[in-house]
Image (cartoon, rainbow, N blue to C red):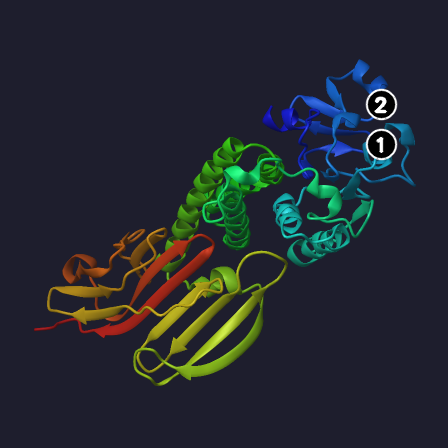
Amino acid sequence: MAEVLLLQESPNPPFAISLTNHGAEHCIVLEDRWIVADEDVLQSVKGILSSRISSPVILLNACGSLRLGDSCVPKKYSVAAALAESGANVIGPMRIVPIFPGLASLFSTLILSGEPLGRIVNALNFHIEEAYGERGAYHLLGDPTFALGSDTVVALLPKEPKSYTQDICPVQKSVAALEACINLFEVLDRCGAWDAGSKAAMESVFEAHRTGVLSTRAKHAILDSPDSVTILKDYLDGAVSHFSTTLVDLVSTCIGAGQWIGSLYAQFSAERDGSWGACARCSDEAITIRFKPFGLGGGHFSRTECDRCGTTIDKIGNHVVDELISVNVTPTELEIFLPKRRVDGIARVLIHRGGLDKGVHWPEEGGIIAFPRDHLGIHGRVTIVALCVSGAELTALYHTIFVPKFLS
């Protein structure tokens, strides 16, 4: 009932609310209640009048919520029309549409970035068309120039921000955690949708979709008390940790099956550009190819390859990668020399094409780990992979070597 309670009248209403569920022109269904515009409807259902919603921006992410001109439902029953007449800016579809994964999260991050509503509607429709192949049907009843940060919004901000310090402001931390959560969802949504054979991955995508309510919870907490912000950040940190682990599991399965991250993530991206540079290991020529994913959200994918020494670096995100791994072959084992990694990441070391299930732990301080050759049957061309996910950034360090079958 948390989302329903957020709709009750409040002295500090959230700047924006996203309502995602089944619905129509005359109602939005939330749990066991309906949001309706006319009291007559409440005689037959349990619900909340739309007049109680005082937020200036509302996304009605439900079928036909903005259908007005050709609707068979009288206008007085239209939730969107009632909200618009009360002074709210209302966004919603003008026809029956499916509930698109990630739309509420995308709406949230665009609102928080200060984009005007007109651009937000365009971005939502573009995302639907590019990511799902459907024609966007979302429109705006309201002011297309309205945005977070305008004079109208200043009055809604907390009246006592002095309890925050600039360095450890919990609001800023909550926004950063929300952005990380949204970006991770986009990566999971993209990877999971293309790995349809992995039931666990698809379940993770559906679980990520359910966090669309964050757009409601985030603005409510940011415009409320410091305690609410702290609770929100704890929730978001937990979600980011869960998504990071899910992404590492998904990519580990992909690598263990002999695939490359590019086959999971970049195959439905547009090749952006390629450039030549010096390999960090052998100084020979290495090529870097960057891919821009279709749709909004999720980081760009890039791959750097050197054919001479077998060094490859994959990454999702715009971070700089300076680290390398090295492998030493002995008669009994492979010694893997690992660099330090980010302490907030989830990291593993794997062998391409299997042998280690989901891999072994990559220590935060780096160091040396050893794989027994006889136990794993390691020989021939072998690729070692060090994988780390930190926030919405993924790094995979590869080193390909030749291991003789017999070594004395």
* Tags 1 and 2 touching, CB below 8 Å: yes
Q: Name the outermost residue toward the top.
A: 43
Where, by quadrant of the figure, is residue 52 drawn? top right
Q: Position of residue 186 (x, y in %)?
A: 55, 52
Residue 272 relative to residue 289: left or right = right
Where, by quadrant of the figure, is residue 20 drawn? top right
* Local crowd size for mark 2, using a 10 Å CA cut-off: few (<14), some (14–19), many (≥20): some
Q: Where's the N terminus, which quadrant? A: top right
Q: Which residue is drawn at 30% across and 82% down?
A: 282
Nearer to us in this view, 236 or 324: 236
Q: Where is residue 44 in the image (x, y as percent from the top left)?
A: 79, 15
Q: Position of residue 143 (x, y in %)?
A: 82, 48
The amino acid type, in three-letter code, at marker 2 is Asp
Residue 29 relative to residue 405: left or right = right
Disc with the residue nearer the chain's start (1 vs 2) = 2
Q: Is residue 125 above or below residue 301?
A: above
Residue 308 relative to residue 68: left or right = left
- Residue linked to disc 1: 82
Q: Residue 38 carries which label?
A: 2
Q: Residue at x 55, y 48 (%)?
A: 182
* Local crowd size for mark 1, using a 10 Å CA cut-off: few (<14), some (14–19), many (≥20): many
Q: Where's the C terminus, which quadrant? A: bottom left
Where, by quadrant of the figure, is residue 78 drawn? top right
Report whether residue 98 is seen: no
Q: How many numbered markers are drawn?
A: 2
Q: Residue at x 48, y 63 (%)?
A: 263
Nearer to us in this view, 259 or 240: 240
Label 1 sits on a secondary structure element that is: helix
Q: Where is residue 252 in the image (x, y as percent from the top left)?
A: 37, 54
The amino acid type, in three-letter code, at marker 1 is Ala
Q: Which residue is drawn at 54% across and 54% down?
A: 190
Q: Name the outermost residue toward the left.
A: 408
